[in-house]
Image (spheres, rainbow, N blue to C red):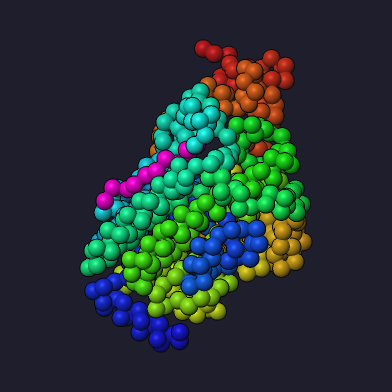
Amino acid sequence: MNPFAWVLSMACLAASANRPNVLLVCVDDLKPALGCHGDKLAITPNIDALAARGVRFEAAYCNQAVCSPSRNALLVGKRPQTLGIYDLATNFRKAAPDAVTLPQRFKAAGYRTEAMGKVFHVGHGNHEDAASWSVPHFQAKTVGYALPENRLSQTREGALFENMDPGDKPKGPAWENADVPDDAYGDGVIAREAVARLKAAAARPDQPFLMAVGFLKPHLPFCAPGKYWNMHDPAKFQLAAVRVPPEGAPSWAPQFGGELRNYKDMPAKDAIAEPVQRKLVHGYYAAASYMDAQLGKVLATLRETGLEEKTIVVLWGDHGWHLGDHGMWCKHTNYEQATRIPLIVAAPGITKPAATRALVETVDIYPTLCGLAGIGVPPGLDGSSFAKVLADPAAKARESVIHVYPRGQRLGRAIRTDTHRLVEWKPIGAPSGEATHELYDYANDPLETRNIAGQDKAALNRLKAMLASHPEPRAQVQSAAGKPIDRAELFKRKDANNDGKLTRAEFLANQPDPDKAPAMFNQFDSDKDGFLSRDEFIHMGRKPG
């Protein structure tokens, strides 16, 4: 479509009383391991079919590779460093009480806004945003098992997602393969609800809607009906080609699967055995295939009800996922596998099947959808519309994207261009001269094997100048919970073998500031026996009283 025709079509949409609907599909922990992205092991026919009628973004990035801050970027339109929220627990309204969310903006414009599944991050102390929705949000059970032996009691992860005290609750398994129907797990329930909501929406032709459908998989635990496991030949899954951190990377930049190690039978610190790694990769792909099938039910209903021709569909993954690359699992980094996301936009009358290399960020989706719907964009958003890319996939949206991840007192701010990524590590507010840098050249080193910040000064300085154009990040606002750390509970979590004492390895595992942790262990170990007793840990080496 030529630019003039696109502008004209947009003007018509804005003037029409029959504005386009929006189906916003949010998928938890989905990386671009999809058939439409060239992954030959992925079985995702419904996502592939959506991509075949829309624009698929090859260079879309999250703003922070963890659930809540990434979803804030989508729904509030502000980056984590603007809000000052880098954790799971703090609700965005603590930082921005008067923020107008994406669904709120559509609701004010006359849309019926609905949500089901995981849209905002609910759990770990965080909660839903009732002001965003025309009707109450529908929530399925986030962590659920089907096999009787796994359903005997609530797990630690299940409690956290339900804003309950995990206490002494047991760890659940990291995967489950059960011969059960699709709605035995949450995504089947969410799809069933979405199908019913779409049928109801079709009966209200004069009421435009924004419907957010949040699928839970492939987030841990990798639970899926057996038929989705059986779709995949486990012998075809290969372990990551590079299983060590980048050469020259600072010690705190990688992470080694702390989230995964909260599940049963996972080692607290040691390397994960290769057979277990293969099972995890198989589980991730099976869970993604299960989610894709549930999405297929929703998209089929959209088509069968006649809504497809007047509904913009957006599929968005909240962040990527490490599957053993660099020896890492889960998200929680600034590396490519954690930050690159799937993004597909199918807008009837605007998009034609295409792939684009245009750089975009999650925060760009809010203003883009407002523009496509003919709704004014609220002031103060961090993103910018990429609507021109939908009309011309060869167009550029940005010169670079920015994303962040904290490690202890440091914040890693990353600039990603077409060819490079720079990560600046320093405490918020510290002079730039105190920063430690990572620099990766993807044209020559696509697997990020070597930090070249000390070798390529020209690229380093060019990207540092780009980073300097961004405002200084805001520090983390006070935790929503506002409670002191329960060190007795923290001791239980760290005591992986439940022997009543912490080894040095148990203490050092998943520390927020790895540089300071060894000295802290020595300080807490008041009797110098090489272990931390419960009292030593709770009182940090000081005598109680």
Q: Residue furthest top?
A: 545
Q: State the extent of the magenta-drawn residues as a range.
A: 135-145
**Figure check: 149 above or below 404:** above
Q: Position of residue 298 (x, y in %)?
A: 41, 59
Q: Position of residue 157 (x, y in %)?
A: 50, 35
Count of marks placed on residues? 0
Can residue 493 be seen by looking at this rendering?
A: yes
Q: Quadrant of residue 450?
A: bottom right
Position of 130 with respect to 36 (left or right) is: left
**Figure check: 195 above or below 496:** below
Q: Residue at x 50, y 30 (%)?
A: 148
Q: Which secondary structure type mostly characterizes the magenta part of the structure?
A: loop
Q: Position of residue 439 (x, y in %)?
A: 69, 59
Q: Quadrant of residue 335?
A: bottom right
- For the N terminus, the image quarter is bottom left
Position of 444 with respect to 266 (left or right) is: right
In the rendered structure, does residue 325 fall within the stretch colored magenta? no
**Figure check: 229 above or below 506:** below
Q: Residue at x 53, y 41 (%)?
A: 179
In the rendered structure, does residue 137 fall within the stretch colored magenta? yes
Between residue 305 and residue 239, name the one nearer to us: 305
Q: Residue at x 55, y 60 (%)?
A: 44
Can residue 71 be seen by looking at this rendering?
A: no
Q: Residue at x 28, y 64 (%)?
A: 202
Q: Quadrant of residue 383?
A: bottom left
Between residue 175 and residue 128, name the one nearer to us: 175
Position of 124 with respect to 37 (left or right) is: left
**Figure check: 142 above or below 106:** above
Q: Position of residue 105 (x, y in %)?
A: 30, 61
